[in-house]
Image (cartoon, rainbow, N blue to C red):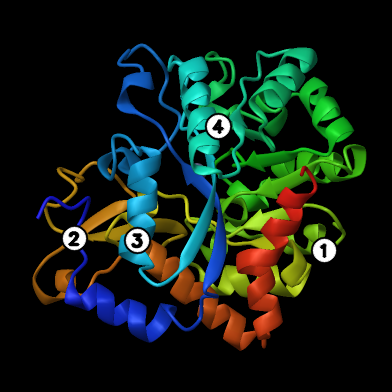
Amino acid sequence: MNQLFDVTPNDTYFYENYIKDFLPDQFVDVHTHVWLKKFKSVREDIPSRTVTWPDRVASENSIEDLLTTYKLLFPDKEVTPLIFGNVSLGDDIEAANDYVKQCARQYGVPALIFASPEWGARELEEKILQGEFLGCKVYLSLSKPYIPADEIRIYDFLPPHQLEVLDQYGWIVMLHIPRKDRLRDPVNLAQMMEMERKYPNVKLIIAHVGRAYCNEDVGNAFEILSDTRNMMFDISANTNQWVFERLIETVGSKRILFGSDLPILRMRAKRICKDGIYINIVPKGIYGDVSRDVHMKEVSGEEAETITFLLYEEIHAFRRAAENMGLSRTDINRIFYENAVNLFKLYK
Ligand SMILES: [Zn+2]
């Protein structure tokens, strides 16, 4: 069978026992990437500022592949994705955004434009209006090439002149925060708090709970974030139950959104933390040579056979957090559906 990827009896068992009844029949996934290989650059003179393991899962993700993924992973559910591209420096950003726009029209799904920090305020405004996007996705890899990866700050790829126009329209911004200290980084936290104050109409979504994948990534972030009223957090690509619990405790159920980060979360992996570094444990051989990647470790035999999709692990971890924190069905429905629908409705 020429299927996008295999679903084993072990995966089905996991889904039926831990996921299916927890998820509402209909849900929204606010964090998905769609792109075609032909938009990607093959240049090697461009700095790589990000981890490399995601490239091993999918070299492209057409809208059709995304929709097929939902059918395979959530066969009895109805899923609406918020889609955006996957753009690095040197890629064809115009073609990538055009493709997302076409997919959104053809399939009637909401979309964000992938914004370049080089665009002026009016340029961003026109592009969003013209493409009927709900806002933008920004990414650190589009910062000026001379800035070392560890020194990139949020405003280097989400500049204030763009925040002003985003604030004016109340548009969505999907933000993956930079820097090696992740959520606990004081520069990140200072700029996040400043955005909260200066641009209160921006619908700011902090992706992956601020990349706090290990307990060590948290620091005093949630104390500082307890003063926020606007910013939202998506749980995509995160599998840390303890972090989810701290998030629920700090912001409640109205500012948490379900997101997957597909296609990379269809990776077969379970995640652990060791000395504050996250490691994806994967079945030996299926993602090529990963020996030089500190975030990857291979296992074989029986242990490998029990590994399911990282997206199932994310949802399972959130489920355990939700149960520990006493979230109700109403809360779960907000996080997986209503919060996102309310966010999108603002624009209709
Ligand atoms: Zn992402």
Seen in the picture, residue 39 relative to 299 is either above or below; the reply is above
- Would you name the residue on which mark 3 appears? 71
- Can residue 273 be seen from the camera position used here? no
In the image, what residue type sits under mark 4? Asp
Mark 2–mark 3 Cα distance, whole angstroms, equals: 12 Å
Q: Secondary structure at mark 3?
A: helix
- For the point 53% across and 24% down, which residue is it? 97
- Would you name the residue on which mark 2 appears? 6
Mark 1–mark 2 Cα distance, whole angstroms, equals: 42 Å
Q: Which of the pair 251/10 is nearer the observer?
A: 10
- Mark nearer the viewer, 1 or 4: 1
Give residue 124's position: percent from left, percent from top.
72, 20
Q: Earlier in the sequence, mark 3 or mark 1?
A: 3
Mark 3–mark 4 Cα distance, whole angstroms, equals: 39 Å
- For the point 61% across and 36% down, which residue is it? 112
Q: Picture quarter containing residue 165? A: top right
In the image, what residue type sits under mark 3? Lys
Q: Earlier in the sequence, mark 1 or mark 2?
A: 2
- Mark nearer the viewer, 2 or 3: 3
In the image, what residue type sits under mark 1? Ser
- Mark nearer the viewer, 3 or 4: 3
- Would you name the residue on which mark 4 appears? 150
In the image, what residue type sits under mark 2? Asp
Mark 3–mark 1 Cα distance, whole angstroms, equals: 38 Å
Dot 2 alpha-carbon crowd within 10 angstroms: few under 14, some 14 to 19, many 20 or more: few
